[in-house]
Amino acid sequence: MGRCPHNKRRVGMEKKKFDVEFHGTNLFALVPLLLFVVFCILFFVVFKTFDMMHLCMGGYVALIIGSLLSKNWGKYWDAVATGMSSKIMNELALILLIVGMFGKLMTRGGVAQGFVWLGDKIGLSGGGFVAFTFIATCVIATATGTSIGTMFTAFPILYPSGLLLGADPVFLAGAILSGAIFGDNVGPISDTTIASASTQEYTNKPGVADVAALTGDTAYFHALTRIWENMAGRKLYLPGGIGSRAQGEGFGPDYELNNHTAYCETCASIANVYWNHRMFLATGDSRYEDVLERALYNGVISGVSLSGDRFFYDNPLESMGQHERQAWFGCACCPGNVTRFMASVPNYMYATQGKDVFVNLYIQSTAHLSTSQNKIEIRQTTDYPWDGKIRMTVHPEKKQTFALRCRIPGWAQDRPIPTDLYHYTGKGKGYTIQVNGKDAEFRVENGYAVILRKWKKGDTVQLDFPMDIRRVEARGEVEDDRGKAAIERGPIVYCIEDKDQPDSLIFNKFIPTGTMISATYAPDMLNGIVTLEGTAQAVGRGGKTTDVPFKAIPYSVWNNRGAAQMAVWIPTSPEYARPEPLPTIASRARTLTIQAPLQKDAPESAATEGWAWGVNDQWEPKRSSDTSKPYHYWWLKRGTKETLAYDFDQAYTVSGVEVYWLDFDHYDGNFRVPASWRLYYKEGDSWKEVEATTPYTTTKDAYNRLDFKPVKTTGLKIAAQLQKGESGGVLEWKVIPAPDKL
């Protein structure tokens, strides 16, 4: 449970103009800091003076010199005064004050002499004392959270002690400085952290929401809101996942929401919950809870199996059967994050503000809440999200007038998410709210039904959100969702999986708009779920369509019965469905990368092989930048020679290939068609280059065909020379069999 500060001061932030200007260049703003560093070196190292007053005077001199370089002295000293009077600097000063007091106590208490006595007693040499000094300053800096304070504490005590024990002065000073800095950095909070935070405007992490709420900084909220609106309006997947690209685990351009290649890292969905929860706590706006709920019931729990021991790192919205949960990962962030997150879910159900209570999530439970003037027990009885009926019994410790704010889910207000990225195709039924069996009097505020009354023990609230089966469509800018619709019931996003279809196929189907769909609770299926059933149309290879029953399951429980084809977005007309293609030489082949031998004189068999995917799936690219379906890319390889190979299921006589090269921009490194390439065929245990009869080409947005003298082989290998400074990849690679008559 959180407390909601309700910070609504989200004033527009204009672009900052630096009002302190310097003669020549604003880099001269660094002069005072650089001079201060020089004074530190002079006092600490050269003169061996460890007096705070000396260093303060050095700082004042540096500031005075800096003012002489500024164009406007008034603005310069105003900035200095503002910094001195800020809350953050006061906290920093308090930390240093306390450290200084402890340091002086230890100095006058004869601690230095004690160290000398102890070192002499245990036979601690000068070199050993240097090591001891480093450890001691680390501990002090970690505990106190200040590197500066540790230096001023340690130098007067440890430095003279070490010299008396024969320590090298340079090494001893280095041990104090490095130990203080190291301990400061590993400490949970430090003066360095506070000081640096006061100078930064880091606005793309959830923690900023907390900073903004605590400080009341409207500029932070302006930036955060812009980021959130861009995410929720242009980059949010329907199940609540975020992040379309595996490269760099990040976002792509606006409306790049490819389904087959969606990254949607499980950890990112969890982060989406955290971020939206904090945005709600700061604003009291239910739109953040709407996104939180969507991510929670779909994007997060899809990341873990029903058995609880297998995990998705990424969560695509389509699969050809190549995607399965794993027991563990080399980068095992998701398993640990999931287990930690699940334990935190009760914290997101309620929030309080003053006397009022916010009800955000509907989960059968008993909660004990403390408001500013009361203690309240709330019992929820519900089968949500399978059923939209929620009964709450309110037990305040004392009778009191306060507002119970019950969230009206966005989906119950004909709004899948609080932006126009997605929309329902029709209107849903209205919701009802009753108190003690009678229609409740309430107003709607920020997406909450505000029930203001004098509450007593045993009062009941009945909410009824109709669980209509809804069709969802995306904005036209989302290319991969054009001509398709998703299915929802309540907050649950559904998908179709091949296990439940009579022909075990997914992509050959479309569900016309207006198709009747019914819901059935299946207690013995996937730990108990509500399934959706209806009649779809299947498109055959000749274009003929036939009626075929379909069954849909919650997206969160797919792949709990083994590898499977799956899709969330289903075509609504035949032109967007794909008949099951006939197998080819390429589609039956095993795809791999063959890296260079470990040493130049090593045999070919010494080369290392790696698994590859995506180039023989028979999905036709629209262009070289079409990453909507699986493809192969050489991530973080730039200007190198890379390979891609087919291992055929048997020997074939082939005479040509067609290669569709990858080419698109990426913030972590661009992908380009290769500078050149060669094709090899396998003969025994070695590779030989084919005798090409047509030129090698690297044309964008088209298949590059290469014909060659027919060969009978069990494999082919592409060796691509990447452009200088650029990476590359292959979208699709076809193999052309030789004519029957040569």
Image (cartoon, helix red, strand yellow):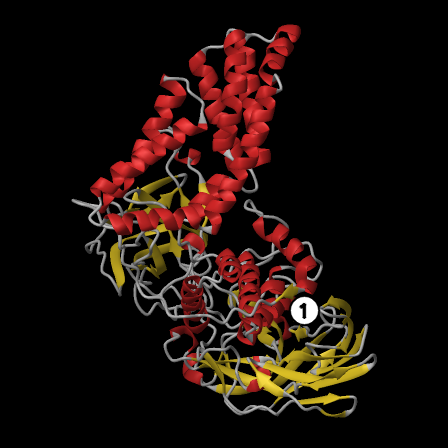
Residue 437 image point, x, y percent: 78, 91
Q: Nearer the viewer, residue 388 or 328?
A: 388
Q: Is residue 537 visible?
A: no
Tell me: 665 left or right of 391: left
Which corner quadrant of the image does residue 366 belong to?
Answer: bottom right
* Number of marks: 1
Residue 552 image point, x, y percent: 61, 77
Q: Which residue is mark 1?
A: 349
Q: Residue at x 45, y 28 (%)?
A: 52
Which corner quadrant of the image does residue 479 belong to?
Answer: bottom left
Residue with the most extreme right position: 458
Residue 375 image point, x, y percent: 77, 69
Kind of residue at badge 1: Met
Which corner quadrant of the image does residue 642 belong to?
Answer: top left
Residue 58 image point, x, y percent: 35, 30
Q: Nearer the viewer, residue 279 or 529?
A: 279
In the rendered image, the vertical position of residue 395 relative to residue 113, given as above or below: below
Q: Name the quarter where the N terminus is drawn.
A: bottom right
Q: Residue at x 70, y 77 (%)?
A: 384
Q: Is residue 423 visible?
A: yes
In the rendered image, the vertical position of residue 364 relative to residue 460, given as above or below: above
Q: Secondary structure at mark 1?
A: loop
Q: Name the quarter where the C terminus is drawn.
A: bottom left
Tell me: 298 left or right of 719: right
- Mark 1, Cα crowd under 10 Å, few <14 / some 14-19 / many 20+, is some
